[in-house]
Amino acid sequence: MTRPGALPLPTRRHALMGALGLGITVEFLGTRAFADSERASGAKKLVAIVARGGLDGLSLSPPVGDPSYAALRGPIALGPFGQAGGALKLDDTFGLHPSLAATHKLALKGEARIAPAIATADRERSHFEAQDVLESGASVVYGAASGWLNRALEAMGPAGKVKAISVGPTAPLILRGRIEAASWSPGGGAGGDPRLPAILADLYAHDPLLGPALASGLAVEAMARTAGQDAALTAGAGGAGGELTARAAQARRLGATLAGFMVQSGGAQVAAISMDAFDTHAGQGAAQGPLALRLAYVDAFLDGLATGLGPAWSDTVVFMATEFGRTARVNGTNGTDHGTASTALILGGGLKKGGIVGDWPTLAQGRLYEDRDTAPTLDMRGLFKGVLRDHLGIERAKLDTLVFPGSAGVAPVSGVV
Amino acid sequence: MAIDRDLGAAIAVTRFGLGARPGEIAAARADPRGWLAAQIRAEGADRPPGPAANSAERINQLLVYRQDRQADKRVGAAKSDASKMAARVIRVEGGGDFLSRLRLGATTGAGFRERWALFWANHFTVSGAKLATAGLVGPFEAEALRPRVFGRFEDLLVASSSHPAMLIYLDQIHSIGPGSAAAQFQAGEGKRRGLNENLAREIMELHTVGVEARYGQADVTEFARAMTGWSVGGEADPADRRGAFMFRERAHEPGTRTIMGRRYAQGGENQARAVMKDLAASPHTAHHLALKIARHFVADAPAPALVGRLERSYLDTGGQLGAVARTLIDSPEAWAAPALKFKTPYEFMVSSWRAAGAVPTDVAAVAPILAALGQKAFSAPSPKGWPEEAEVWCAPDAIVKRMAWSETFAAEATGDRDPIRLADAALGARLTPLVAATIARAETRPEGLSILLMSPEFQRR
């Protein structure tokens, strides 16, 4: 071990090198590009967005063409296509929420699709159980302690290289596990004492939790500076938007910064981000209101991400999924309660063209799950397995056992990527 | 496993308590268990210092704010100065409550009692993330929880579930029985209002029996019906009821309810109380609470024997939480476990102030740091509260930010004190030779304190 007191360490750059003594990734610092010839999937990128709280699929992608929709939804129904504040048309049945203008533009180019009746294997309508099943990839609640995205990294190749990042100050379950993942959130804190990182790196040398965390955090901090500069340019040059609220502008910048992380040479290949506050029990609104604001935030994030990725967008798949949908009927307080199936969004420059992913059970009487919720027609694991197989090249056997244990009966969805 | 008194004192103060102030470990050394047991008292936890916050006053401020906003909207104006100011007052007062709680944590000589109170505040989470509850978290904890944390769980449950803050936070105030007089009247007016099951569901899932009890959707809906009428007085109600708990008979769903196989006769307000009594007495609740207590105080994956002891104590005493706290202290597993609990940002900062003998003074300086570390003041992300697991809090980004804060804090707090003495006082027998040697080699006193605060032993408890 290096004796920390003996090292002159005038800059943070040196401190980073001190952290490297722990054997954590050099690649992440961006010293060399991915050798694509070594592994074709090296350039492929995946971004997972977990929408927490139970996102109302019938507002995200309102089926305004479904004959039962307007009556079930009452005051929270979105208006028909073409009407001011109405749904943005995808096909004869489905539209997107009017807050999702940038996403809608992507959809018209075939770069965004919806899976409107998708659900996890959990049916208990508990946020916490359903989020656990969604993120762990297990077939039962608390069936796995790590996240399926982390196990997908494990399935892709040798461990030890940092190639995943989560956005936010805490680590979401979907990306927790054996493969070390970086994390980052805006407002990085560089301290004053240039010696401290190296001293702590030594102190953490045998600490299984703190050691890797510090090394990875320092590496990301260095990347953030570069990515942040790129993002400022991207966000400033953005054409879409018009009247972005301050928060939406912030979301757009977040998307662009994340893109900056991913396009740097040696940057993260897989990223996870949580968005919360979708638990709309009361007063959720329709074209305007609290949910519309949250969706505008999502739209701005996606726009910033897609724009920021530039040419890499065609090698990127983004999905957004939620733990469950909400009741088909508006409840007594102009909101919706915990339901079952919801909508997943799939985006990317290289998507295959096509309509909705999975079948639409309709909202007709007798077709609702327990006479209450959108009925699930697609197991979320099927979509994830399809993306992992067709986009990242993970073989079926590993998907059935390692990534989604006990899921051999759930076929990967074809024709998306 | 026998633990010597030096290590016992360090564990008592840092694991069960909130971290050591200078001299505290030495004071606990004579009898670590007795030092903890003496903090359990029938009158509950301490109230944070400062003017007593009052939830009814805060709700009345909110009502005034909403009137201002509606007036703004009627004239088509943007937010007027009056309504902006009112919103700011609500946020500022919430910040003041939070600072009072931090100061109590930083200064109390009864760190175990305060940790016990914080545990229950997290168990019965009311998040101030929304403006409607932003000013209510402090009053909720002080009025509903703190006086009862060593009493009967059933009383704590009823106090939480009937407090205006909880009724607002989990939408109970909007819930109306579909067959109630109020619903029929409103239907005549062309309005449609009805049931909201949010609070009923979370009481069952998070506060009492937990999902392992395997109740169904029908049980949740039935409980939600039983709870209709539990509400908060508003503008149209008599002045002395505004902002206080109020049972609205006209909103209550008439009839007998069946929940988890038991029938509850129509009894107005008391129907939901009868359900809560049975929920509190359920063995599922005993297990759920025992597991959570063990997870919080001892280990993310606690020894089953410890959970079993706590569970039996709960059942044997009819849910007396003071007795459960005593059982925790008397459990050998709670002392023998290695220090693997990773401090949350709140715990890390409070224990840092304690180690330095410092007191936070400016919430505007503290709040952004807690937010950056992932634990925004009074704003748990969901009714489930803040997570316990080390993996959540020891994320790379957060560690770099903890390090940066440690440096800033040490620069202000160290003064001319010897960091190795501070380390001895903060960790006692838990201070390792490696950390002591590293601190001894520090170039400056503040660097030495930063090393202490960021040491693996200080980050855990």
Image: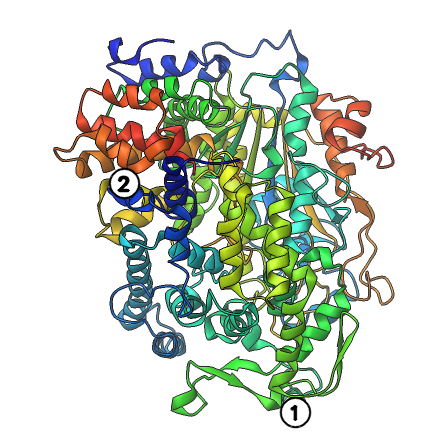
**Disc 2 is attached to a residue of which chain?**
B
B316 or B179: nearer the viewer: B316
Residue nearest the observer in this picture, A277 or B30: B30
Question: For the C terminus of chain A, which image quadrant?
Answer: top right
Q: Is A392 on the left or on the right of B373, as rendered?
A: right
**Quick one: label 2, few (<14), some, or many (20+) residues within 10 Å?**
many
Q: Amino acid type of disc 1? A: Ala
Looking at the picture, which amino acid does disc 2 mark?
Answer: Ala
Q: Chain of mark 1?
A: B
Q: Position of residue A10 (x, y in %)?
A: 23, 14
Q: Are marks 2 and 1 in contact (CB under 8 Å)?
A: no
Q: Which residue is mark 2?
A: B355
Residue drawn where x is 23% and y is 40% of the image:
B356
Image point (34%, 75%), residue name: B54
- Left or right: residue A214 versus residue B424 is right
Asked if labels 2 and 1 share a chain, the reply is: yes
Q: Secondary structure at mark 2?
A: helix
Q: Which residue is mark 1?
A: B181
Left or right position of B384 against A264: right
- Residue A392 higher or lower than A6, as above or below: below
Number of residues whose C-alpha sits closer than 10 Å to that of mark 1, classed few (under 14), some (14–19) or many (20 or more): some
**Distance (Cα) linking label 2 and label 1:** 59 Å
- Give residue A225's mark: none
Question: Is residue B342 or residue A245 the one in the foreground?
Answer: B342
Q: Quadrant of the N terminus of chain A?
A: top left
- Which of discs 2 and 1 lies nearer the camera? The answer is 2
Query: Residue B81: x percent and y percent?
Result: 27, 69
